[in-house]
Image: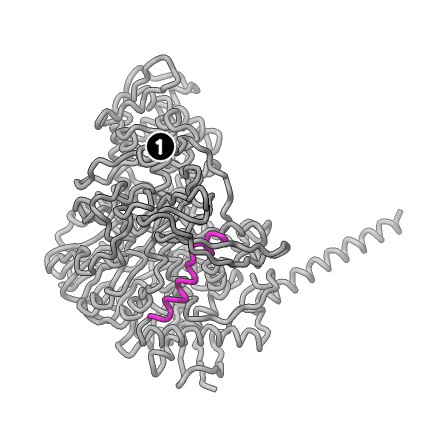
Amino acid sequence: MARIFSLLLKIVSGLVLLTVLAIWLTYWLAARSLPDYNADYEVDGIAAPVEIARDNANVPHIFGESDEDVYYGLGFAHAQDRLFQMMLLRRTAQGRLSEIFGERTLKTDELMRRLGLYEAAKASARVQTPKATAALEAYARGVNAWIAEVNEGALGRGAPEFFLFPSEIAYWQPADSIAILKLVAVQLSDQIPNEVLRAQASLLLPQDRLKDLMPDAPGTGLGVLPSYAELFPEAQPGKPASGTQYAMSPFPEAGLAGASNVWAAGPERSATGATLLANDPHLNFSAPGAWYLARLELSTGGVIGASVPGIPAIISGRHERFGWGITAAYLDDADLYIEKQNPDAPNEVLTPEGYKPLQTRPSIVQIKGAPPQTLTLQWSENGPILPATAFDVDTITPSGHLVSVAWTALVSDDRSMSSAVALNHARTLSEAMAAARDFAAPALNLAMADPDRVQMKVIGRAPLRDARHQSKGRIPSPGWLETNRWQGWRDFNDLPLFTAGRDGIIGNTNNKTVDAPFPDHLSYHWGDTQRVQRWQRLMQMREVHTRDSFIEVQNDVVSPSARTLLPLVGADLWFTGEAAPEGTPERQRQRALELLAEWNGEMNEHLPEPLIYYAWMRALQDRLIRDEIGPLAHAFTHVDPLFIERVYRDIDGASAWCDVIQSAPVETCTDIARLSLDDALLWIDEHYSSNLESLRWGDAHMAHHDHPVLGNVPFLKWVVNIRQSTSGGDNTLMRGVTSGDPDDPFVNVHGAAYRGVYDFADPDSSVFIIATGQSGHPLSRHYDDLGELWRRGEYVPMSLDPELARAAGVGITHLLPQ
């Protein structure tokens, strides 16, 4: 017995020792890829030494004797900290994910290949300005210099994730950077899924009820539209989607496209007598995040702000006396077309001149662990043909038809990169406006400020549509009619320009900006109708603003929709009847109503009321719509305040939604409000607690910054994913969009991953922050070190003082020409 015990002890000890050695070896290999920020490197491709001084937040301040050398340094720094992220973005754009992830990403690769986004990027690389071309080439040399250092120095393959994939790291090309900028356009637009969803809903609902469910932003300018069934009588209402999964797709779901806040105050609205500007672009959360803070010392002076790894430019930032910020303009930059196939020749589709063959090209997709597949890519005169399952277009496509897409992100003469590089050199409003002329996609609101003036301009290509367009671009239209096709581009000078003057304030929260009727409008689909109400109020509450007041507004968590909806929905529920016995559903309902009656709409992470409110409104919306649209209700997972307000104000008969069609009695809106509150309280009890006072919104509204590859791997997910308890919600200025997932609906998945506030009275007092950290390496202390500051609404200094960067830095890297 003793011998057996001794043997078992030796075996267990050996296994423990092997496990420890394996963990140590894994850690050692992973740690090899941590960059040494104090190293000197002899590199090829620069004319003179380059200095990369990283301050105590690990923000690189890059100095060189020429602009090309500075862009080289940015490429080197991006690659040091975010190499795997850059390579993953490039593979996504190229449609080459399946080479390392296998068949699960095949559908995403097919979609990207069919769209031809990377081919458009390669074509666009040939039409950039000389300055942008030089920047792109220098940046690529910088990225490749770090890849060479990794290969020659056996530096852990550059990132620990690369140990999971045997494929080599291809060197960076200028087209790769343009492709990543096009991916930003992909992430900022949901016009395509919104068209599909509106078409699906119009097949199930009369026009009046469709206007309730997908309401127009307040304002004028909309005429009567035909229903989708009128355009395509053969389309089948309620046709089920294929359910095909598009793993690691860059395309946002409807309601989760890019958003943002930006505003600027003229000198007379500023306490210091100089302008102020604040910007917080909103994107899907990830680890590492989408943004990377950097400072470039160019020939035109220093520029500092937020960059995107893979792109040689500051996207939102400031110079010494000029700054700019961006929001998604929600310009209608994409249209879906239904293409009628020739019954006798399916490779032909109808055009205004009769049937014509589709353009075709083969494309081979290499798949890890499976044979390669050959795709036949197709294009009509309107654009690429989509896969039948993409965006659920199969649910609205009549038999004998295909679906194509026209989209500004797919143009092959896209000089947006040239515009971004030129903006980094702009020193005045007029120079910035000239730089913005070349911008194509994504469409943006560009807010600009120098010490004396503030302006905002809509930039990006805006399609010209015929006034006789059948669907006005709101739902897919017949692609064979000339009146439905794009007629060119609107002139840059015709796009809206907003000038506030010295005593004014400009801003945008993705709200509707133009009331012009079709076709002179910008869009029918906007990203906000709620935040703008709170923003207007906070801007007008003060005669003058300061940097700190702008920070306060950026971090405001009061929900205007909660303040509007609760008195409407609960009007007949508050303080009615006697107090119910303890332990009964009626008493729980009364307790919830008492809490909400005393709540001011503040979506604070420590309060219970936000969770009760959101759970109630979510259950209410589901009860209102599910019996009307059935399974399509799964697509409306986010509370739409305009819809609920229309119902409870009975606008154009919208209270008809309250009656349950399948039941004999006629339910009132009060009945539905009471029942849905009971639903919400039952759900809260099952998932959190029946003690309402002990609830915390932050427990339900955790920000999920997940690693795109390792985020679901057991054990590793606890290392690479970042979780933060957060305030805010879908409609607060400090925006934290809920997931809508049935299992965890209030998780925070989309928000301001970058915030910056620029004060031109004292530019070096400007501040900025990102949601995670500068490094993409999970073992780096800079992987998530900025996240806690971001969560608390705090910032780090945004200074152009080179001595401050050098003195308080984490390291200085010198690049020396070979």
Q: Is residue 648 magenta?
A: no
Left or right: 291 as drawn, with respect to 484: right
Q: What is the three-letter code of the residue carrying label 1?
A: Pro
Q: Nearer the viewer, residue 741 or 473?
A: 473
Please tell me which residue is depicted at 17% across the width and 62% down the height of the picture. Answer: 275
The main secondary structure of the magenta stretch is helix
Q: Nearer the viewer, residue 229 or 572?
A: 229
Can residue 66 be seen here? yes
Can residue 737 be seen here? no
**Quarter of the image holding residue 194?**
top left
**Quarter of the image holding residue 204?**
top left
Left or right: 494 as drawn, with respect to 411: left
Q: Nearer the viewer, residue 802 or 417?
A: 417
Please tell me which residue is depicted at 29% across the width and 60% down the height of the picture. Answer: 440
Q: Which residue is mark 1?
A: 233
* Percent x, y of residue 703: 42, 48
Q: How busy is the neighbourhood of tag 1: few (under 14 within 10 Å), some, or many (20 plus)? A: few
Q: In the displayed structure, would residue 262 be above or below residue 70? A: above
What segment carries the magenta color?
109-127
Considering every residue shown, the one lying at the far top of the view is 664
Colour basis? one colour
Please tell me which residue is depicted at 36% across the width and 20% down the height of the picture. Answer: 660
* Percent x, y of residue 713: 58, 51
**How many marks are shown on the rendered structure?**
1
Kindly state the secondary structure of the residue where label 1 is placed: loop
* Percent x, y of residue 5: 84, 49
Q: In the displayed structure, would residue 815 be above or below residue 761? A: below
* Percent x, y of residue 651: 22, 28
Please tell me which residue is depicted at 44% across the width and 30% down the height of the picture. Answer: 631
Left or right: 373 as drawn, with respect to 800: right
